[in-house]
Image (spheres, rainbow, N blue to C red):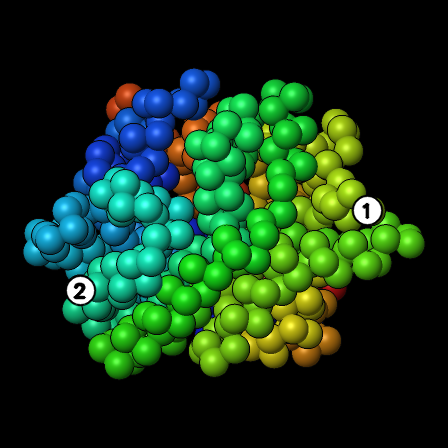
């Protein structure tokens, strides 16, 4: 394959809590002021007000797709209240995409919950599936014309977070640990060896996903799927049994649950080994990223091949990128990742698009240090400064990758 197909989606992704700012009714907002060491999201990138500028920059660069999320805590700030104004806000975002010739990919849940939902018991409470379905039913009223909808982002990471939160409450975990950290060796080591979620923590997300899939389909005609954090896991020799257990608990149970979906979102950053004790922390190396993970652009091809083998579904790469302060490394990483993606497609993977994480340098769940963006954002003035990687990705899109493929 010496070019990506016509009609391939090229774009970038964001998540509401990470870019919008002042998501005051969410559990993350509450958590940020409670947990020591966690930086607050504050105004974030003020994308709540500046989304048109974000979409225009993406479109001007030559990209054709924007993945963004709806924030449940804004749309349903109280259990008995759905905000028409917030629904209208998100409809305006969708309309702005259409105006700029951009295909919107809409995520319905990306890590943050309404604080009231959390207080009710969160995802492990018996009413969780119905609560989520009620929100999605309302959200679906503004999704006309949207062709791609993701119900839940990274349910496997969510399951891990819920498990850690419960452990913290019970006192079996000293300190709640954000899944990503900035270049602090100790914390990076902890993050890189986070526990694998037990299946019981993933089951509520599977029920919720299945509970809303047809609601969205019936009301919108969109293709519906969910996006999984793909570990590109490998077994150390002799530890295949443990590897299969970890692979199932972390990834494959969520891939199996995608049976009956219209597509699946692949989210890949690095690759990790599994030995007899479980996930092996990323070895320390000067090339490691700002979140402590190994520099592994080949992980995307591995992830796509694995997802194809397990699900056979059409794939949208909904996240891939690197936390780095050096934009030349971002271009180098993405070039390699796209080559591995093309190889996997040559070998039969049905991939419909590539969305880079992230459009903006944004709030990385407790930290501002790890910069994943194609665009830098001044935290005081909110001035956006596109990096060379934005123009590079736009040009790669325009030329369907011809310059980087052999
Ligand atoms: O920032 C996150 C995103 O919210 C979910 N996937 C991984 C990204 C980088 O850590």
Residue 283, by quadrant, is top right
Instruction: State the quadrant of the C terminus.
Output: bottom right
* Residue position for label 2: 138
Q: Helix or strand or loop: what does disc 2 sit on?
A: helix
Q: Is residue 221 left or right of residue 197?
A: left
Residue 369 seen in the current view: yes
The location of residue 353, given as percent across then percent down, is 50, 66
Viewer-nearest residue: 205 or 47: 205
Q: Residue at x 28, y 75 (%)?
A: 215
First of labels 1, 2 by sequence position: 2
- Does the beta carbon at disc 1 come under 8 Å from ligand 1? no
Q: Residue at x 68, y 74 (%)?
A: 309
Instruction: State the quadrant of the N terminus.
Output: bottom right
Q: Residues within 10 Å of mark 2 (few under 14, many from 20)?
A: some
Alpha carbon separation for disc pair 1 and 2: 45 Å
* Residue position for label 1: 275
Q: Residue at x 59, y 65 (%)?
A: 253
The location of residue 44, given as percent across then percent down, is 31, 32
Residue 385 seen in the current view: no
Using the image, determine if residue 57 lies above or below residue 395. above
Q: Is residue 285 left or right of residue 188?
A: right
Viewer-nearest residue: 400 or 9: 9
Q: Is residue 380 left or right of residue 3?
A: left
The location of residue 54, given as percent across then percent down, is 31, 45
Q: Residue furthest top?
A: 36
Q: Residue at x 32, y 62 (%)?
A: 129
The location of residue 115, given as percent across then percent down, is 26, 40
Disc nearest the viewer among 1 and 2: 1
Residue 339, by quadrant, is bottom right
Q: Residue furthest right?
A: 238
């Amino acid at each position: 394959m010496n070019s990506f197909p016509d009609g391939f989606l090229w774009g970038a992704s964001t998540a509401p809590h990470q870019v919008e700012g002042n998501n005051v009714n969410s559990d993350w907002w509450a958590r940020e002021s409670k947990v020591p060491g966690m930086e607050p999201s504050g105004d974030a990138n003020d994308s709540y007000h500046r989304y048109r500028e974000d979409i225009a920059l993406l479109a001007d660069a030559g990209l054709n797709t924007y993945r963004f999320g709806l924030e449940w805590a804004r749309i349903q700030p109280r259990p008995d209240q759905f905000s028409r104004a917030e629904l209208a806000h998100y409809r305006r975002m969708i309309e702005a995409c259409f105006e700029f010739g951009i295909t919107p990919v809409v995520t319905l849940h990306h890590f943050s919950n309404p604080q009231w939902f959390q207080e009710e018991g969160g995802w492990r409470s018996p009413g969780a599936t119905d609560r989520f379905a009620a929100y999605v039913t309302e959200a679906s009223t503004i999704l006309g014309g949207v062709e791609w909808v993701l119900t839940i982002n990274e349910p496997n990471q969510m399951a891990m977070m819920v498990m850690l939160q419960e452990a913290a409450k019970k006192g079996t975990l000293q300190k709640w640990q954000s899944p990503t950290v900035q270049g602090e060796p100790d914390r990076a080591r902890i993050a890189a060896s986070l526990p694998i979620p037990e299946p019981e923590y993933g089951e509520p997300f599977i029920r919720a996903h299945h509970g809303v899939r047809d609601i969205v389909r019936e009301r919108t005609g969109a293709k519906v799927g969910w996006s999984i954090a793909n570990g590109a896991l490998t077994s150390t020799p002799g530890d295949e049994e443990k590897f299969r257990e970890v692979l199932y608990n972390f990834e494959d149970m969520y891939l199996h649950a995608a049976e009956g979906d219209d597509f699946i979102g692949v989210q890949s950053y690095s690759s990790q080994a599994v030995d007899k004790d479980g996930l092996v922390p990323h070895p320390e190396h000067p090339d490691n990223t700002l979140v402590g993970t190994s520099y592994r652009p080949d992980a995307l091809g591995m992830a796509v091949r694995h997802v194809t083998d397990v699900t056979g579904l059409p794939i949208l790469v909904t996240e891939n990128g690197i936390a780095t302060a050096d934009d030349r490394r971002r271009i180098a990483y993405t070039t390699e990742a796209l080559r591995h993606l093309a190889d996997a497609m040559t070998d039969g993977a049905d991939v419909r698009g590539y969305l880079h994480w992230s459009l903006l340098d944004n709030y990385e769940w407790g930290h501002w240090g790890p910069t994943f963006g194609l665009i830098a954002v001044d935290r005081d003035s909110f001035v956006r400064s596109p990096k060379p990687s934005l123009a590079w990705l736009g040009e790669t899109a325009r030329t369907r990758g011809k310059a980087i493929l052999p």
